[in-house]
Image (cartoon, grey):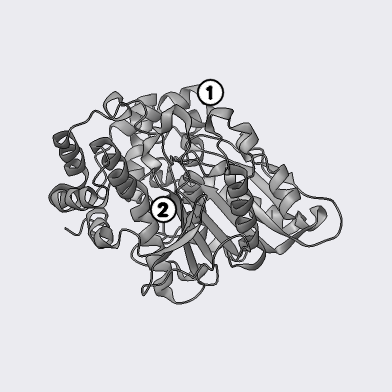
Amino acid sequence: VGEDCLTLHVWTPGLDSGKRPVMVWLHGGAFSYGSANSPRYDSTNLARRQDVVVVAVNHRLNIFGHLDLSSLGDERFARSGNAGVLDLVAALKWVREHAGRFGGDPGNVTIFGQSGGGGKSCALLAMPEAKGLFHKAIVQSGASVRFAEPERTAELAHAVLKHLGLRPDQRAELQALPLARLQEAVVPAQQTLPRPRLPLLDRYNFGPVIDGTVLPAHPFDPSAPAISDDVPIMVGGTKDETAIFFAPDDKVWNRTITEEDLRTRVAAVADGAAETLLAYYKRRDPNASPSDRLITALTMSNFHVRELILAGAKAARGKAPVWMYGLDWETPAFGGRLKSPHSVDVPFVFDTLHVIGAAHRRPGDQALADRVSATWATFARTGKPDSAALPAWPAYTAATRATMILDDTCKVVDDLDGEVRALWIKVASGAL
């Protein structure tokens, strides 16, 4: 649509002239892989049952969307590091122009995305060119506080050119290379980069670039972007995000790591704060195995801490509200070892539990999917997640830090893990 690199899929309850909320889905994949074509993202049920229009976007990723050649001095490549997120702006402009043809309201657009898609939502919240193209945002398991800075992306670009055997002035030769040859450079070029200064916050190499124009500043560091002051946000994740990433680790999978193993692994992330954190999780979950406490601790370090920073920064602006949630539902698959892993929320949002396989199903899961998909659509419709299927859900503020827990029984918890919240933020922000 508009550009040969951009594809949009549209789901709608009907082609009448009604003005329904438009929900624009941004798929996951760390800005590097994935697509909107997964069966889990089939928006038929979400559109029909919740009376919304859903648009899903495919766009440039990885080296094709985020190779920052701006340091080479050619104006044609000044915005190359942000090509992928500029594709998203092009998609939102298309929605503004054409949503009415599908029964959608271009004045009521919600962006929502999971994992890297949540990061894409964060990028759009900080992009002046996206101002006014959407009106609400949902960030699922992918809060992005910071993106790469030009010094790092320039170093990565030069590593790509070196791997390909090209000089900086051979831009025509670079553009003529086959796609497969460019892809071959992705991993070796990234391996040349030093460890990022803030590894828990600086998440992406091939991703958005803080270039001063497309992205003038980091999305939520040190504060939330003023340009999206009028945009309500929902942000959250799953209880045990990292369980899926530990699946290849036999010691964690079999729950055989020792207390000393746990201490070593947490110290590698939290350094001097490790003992305080270990003591907290042992006290909080006295019957949990060291493997389960590792999953809990590193879910906080790798995911939840960024959600807390985002919510705190947004609330501090005192403008449009922010709501925080946590999905605690655990899959019974593999004897429950995966718990509530990264991406388990997606089929609840899209009401696609029928595609995930019988091993992941358990009684009551469809009722939760009904509640979650209705809540997401209600937020898209009104700017508040006031679903009749949930208890009263207050906005996140510094006074209460309310979090809606989504499970077989839903409830609000104030300042979840508040005893270590500030400490984890210091760890992630390099403030210890």
Q: Quadrant of the N terminus?
A: top right
| Image mark count | 2
Decide: few, some or many residues near mark 2? Use Cα within 10 Å; few <14, some 14-19, many ≥20: many
Question: Can residue 223 be seen in the rendering of this structure?
Answer: yes
- Measured along the vertical axis of the image, is residue 101 above or below residue 299? below
Is residue 214 visible from the viewing direction of this image? no
Q: Quadrant of the C terminus?
A: bottom left
Q: Residue at x 25, y 56 (%)?
A: 424
Front residue of this view, candidates 427 and 157: 427
Percent coordinates x, y for residue 257 in the rendering: 22, 30
Residue 301's spot in the image, x, y percent? 30, 48
Mark 1 or mark 2, which is nearer the start of the sequence?
Answer: 2
Q: Residues within 10 Å of mark 1 (few under 14, many from 20)?
A: few
Give the amino acid at mark 1.
Answer: Pro
Q: On screen, 315 above or below 328?
A: below
Q: Outermost residue, bottom direction?
A: 318
Expressed as whole percent of the image width and height from the top left, the position of residue 218 reads 39, 59
Mark number, residue 103: none
Q: Does residue 117 sit above or below 231 in this rendering?
A: above
Q: Amino acid at mark 2?
A: Ser
**Looking at the image, is mark 2 or mark 1 nearer the viewer?**
2
Q: Which residue is mark 2?
A: 144
Front residue of this view, candidates 208 and 396: 396
Task: Kindly report the distance in space between the C-alpha atoms of the residues bearing marks 2 and 1.
Answer: 32 Å
**Pointers 2 and 1 in contact (C-beta within 8 Å):** no
Residue receiving disc 1: 178
Q: Find numbered disc 1 in the image and state the secondary structure of the residue it sits on.
A: loop
Q: Residue 384, how many percent across, how many down?
A: 59, 67
